Amino acid sequence: MKIRAVTSLEKDSVHQVHCSAFPEEERELVANLAVGLLSEKTTPETISLVAEAEGAIVGHVAFSPVTVDGSDRPTYILAPLAVTPNHQKQRIGTQLVETGIQQLTQMGVDTLLVYGDPNYYSRFGFSEATAKPYLPPYELQYPFGWQGLVLSDRSPPTSPVRINCVAALQDPALW
Ligand SMILES: CC(C)(COP(=O)(O)OP(=O)(O)OC[C@H]1O[C@@H](n2cnc3c(N)ncnc32)[C@H](O)[C@@H]1OP(=O)(O)O)[C@@H](O)C(=O)NCCC(=O)NCCS
């Protein structure tokens, strides 16, 4: 199994990974987000990593930059993440997330945000407390899922700051 950057020819495979992993009511929304992020041209870059096993794409994760009002702190959000059901529980999700975290740390990113299950993301050190000052663009359906991970040695913001996401994430249904 290897983790590598996605190529421009892999949209269908990325869509398929998310469709296979997410429940029916969410799968189109999340798969379309994953594909939408592949065409985001951002500075700094939007990162998409895939896990390849025996020539097939079996996992995908994306990291896109967010701007923080009144601040130049490099900040990213992790979304979405999926591993195909028959390849789960083999640490592929962990390796996708950890590879992204390494890359973002080398880029000098300050904080990585995520909106997902704390039972999963806490294993990487994400916490609700770290995300607290960052106000998401829409009201959250599950506020406990809003978490952050500090990647630098700069101290976190002390007062609330509004964040702005890339176009693909600007859909209230995702939040
Ligand atoms: C979440 C997901 C990406 C994990 O991928 P994976 O390759 O199986 O992850 P890993 O093998 O690195 O870790 C598996 C562990 O995470 C646990 N796990 C998976 N989903 C979890 C969740 N929502 N909450 C808590 N733990 C979870 C598994 O039970 C397993 O635990 P174990 O290590 O004690 O056996 C995968 O289960 C998936 O695609 N799920 C559906 C899509 C999804 O929910 N994505 C967003 C994540 S919040």
Image (tube, rainbow, N blue to C red):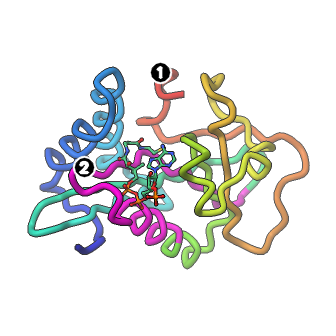
Which percent across, then down, holds residue 32? Answer: 29, 34
Please tell me which residue is depicted at 78% across the width and 74% down the height of the picture: 153
Number of marks present in the image shown: 2
For residue 2, what is the image quadrant? bottom left
In the image, 8: left or right of 34? left
**Residue 169, position as x, y percentages in the image:** 47, 35
Q: Extreme left residue here?
A: 55
CB of mark 2 near ligand 1 (< 8 Å): yes
Choose between 152 and 146: the one closer to the eye. 146
Amino acid type at image mark 1: Ala
Q: Nearer the viewer, residue 73 or 13?
A: 13
Is 113 left or right of 17, judged from the image as shown?
A: right
Q: Does mark 1 have its CB less than 8 Å from ligand 1?
A: no
Tag 2 and tag 1, C-beta contact below 8 Å: no
Residue at 76% across / 52% down in the picture? 130
Mark on residue 84? 2
Q: Which element carries disc 2, helix, strand or loop?
A: loop
| Secondary structure beneath label 1 | helix
Residue type, label 2: Thr
Marks 2/1: CA–CA distance: 23 Å
Mark 2 vs mark 1, foreground winner is 2
Which residue in the protein does label 1 denote?
173
In the picture, the quarter occupied by the C terminus is top right
Q: Residue at x 61, y 39 (%)?
A: 164
Could you tell me which quadrant the N terminus lies in?
bottom left
Of 88 and 73, nearer the camera is 88
Which range is magenta?
72-101
Dot placed on the residue nearer the N-terminal end, 2 or 1:
2
Q: Which mark is residue 76?
A: none
